[in-house]
Amino acid sequence: MPVSLGYIVKRIITILLVIIGVAAFSYIILMITPGDPASKWAGNPRGRAAELAIELARKELGLDKPLYIQVVRFVWNILTGNLGVSIATKEPVTTAIYTALAATLELLVVAYAIAVPLALFLGMHAALNRGSLTDKLVMSLGVILASTPTFWLAVIILAICSLAGFIPYGRVSEHLRMATGFTPITGLYLLDSLIQGNYAVFIDVLIRIIPAAIAVSVYPIGALARATRILVAEALLEDYVKAAVAWGVKRSTILRTYILRSITPPIIQIAGISFAYSLVDAMVVESVMGRQGLGQLLLSSIYTSDFRVAVGLVVYLTGFYVVINTLVDVMQAYVDPRVKI
């Protein structure tokens, strides 16, 4: 078995320690920043009774306790899954985060559905034409794409779409949503619209998510294209590939059976790390294009001093990074029999 029990136990302990540390640190940072959550919880009261209302709110939120007690209580609530309700909206924090996470994951999946095939094609094409103008263009393009600021690119794409007469703002047209009776089920609008047979909403969601997905896909295209080119070029120099060529094996068979199989493990690792990194890019793009995802949720929680949502979101994002890295290691171990963890 490529994955040992010891590795799983060690990873679980690591995840718990990381979450505890991030939760405690984030809570302390937010508590010492400007803004009073108690005032927001009390409804921003004015007048003579304002001080009393805010004091009662502080007791209700537990902010009247010493900071170390607040931290311990909050970390315990994080570990038990009890994040309470949002100070700003009064809805459960976990519900708000899961709803936003579904929107962000949908954007990431579409972005990588664009990025991975295109990057593999560009990288392999460059490797098969080493030293040519195409090779130089792909490698240069990879550096440019991987270094392009996502925020700036999202603004440019939004401006181009606006000049073309279409503004891809939001996840779906509210008018179309109400007219067709569309109701989210899983939070993934593309999937939900197909489940309900609502093809008008599916098309609207698709054309709105593609510009955002293009902005998010730029970094993984650049990173994966360069990595693929290097890996394929190295694989072409291996003795077993040269032997296959000498025996007259078809080029397509060599690429599919030998080259792709040999580069799959490192590509999975690079794509997994890029996927976790692209979460930040997706949040930035969401804030630019008005998509209701983790990006807007984080901004609104900071603006409203909603420390429960803000810290809960930071903890969930930390868990997302750790889990993705773990899954990448496990997948690599199953794909490559040489890897034992």
Image: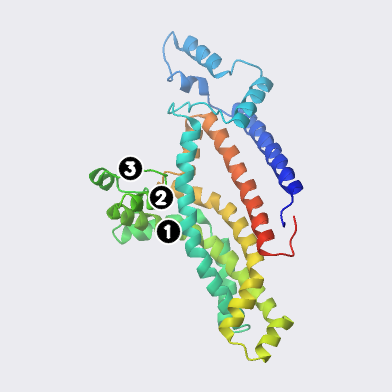
| Residue that protrudes farthest toward the left in the picture | 179
Front of the two marks 3 and 1: 3
Q: Residue at x 60, y 27 (%)?
A: 77
> What residue is pinned by disc 3?
183
> What residue is pinned by disc 2?
289
| Residue that protrudes farthest toward the front in the picture | 1
Specify few, some or many for label 2: CA neighbours under 10 Å numbering under 14, 14-19, or 20 or more: many
The numbered disc on residue 273 is none
> What residue is pinned by disc 1?
156
Specify few, some or many for label 3: CA neighbours under 10 Å numbering under 14, 14-19, or 20 or more: few
- Residue 171 versus residue 141: which sits nearer the camera? 171
Which amino acid is tagged 2? Met
Q: CA distance from mark 3 to mark 1?
A: 32 Å
- Residue 40 versus residue 312: which sits nearer the camera? 312
Front of the two marks 2 and 1: 2
Q: Is residue 179 above or below residue 47?
A: below
The secondary element bearing badge 2 is classed as helix
- Residue 85 in the image: x percent, y percent? 49, 26
Quadrant housing residue 251: bottom right
Sequence-first disc among 2 and 1: 1
Can residue 153 be spotted in the picture? no
Which amino acid is tagged 3? Thr
Q: CA distance from mark 2 to mark 3?
A: 22 Å
Which amino acid is tagged 1? Ile
Q: Is residue 41 left or right of residue 270?
A: left
Sequence-first disc among 2 and 3: 3
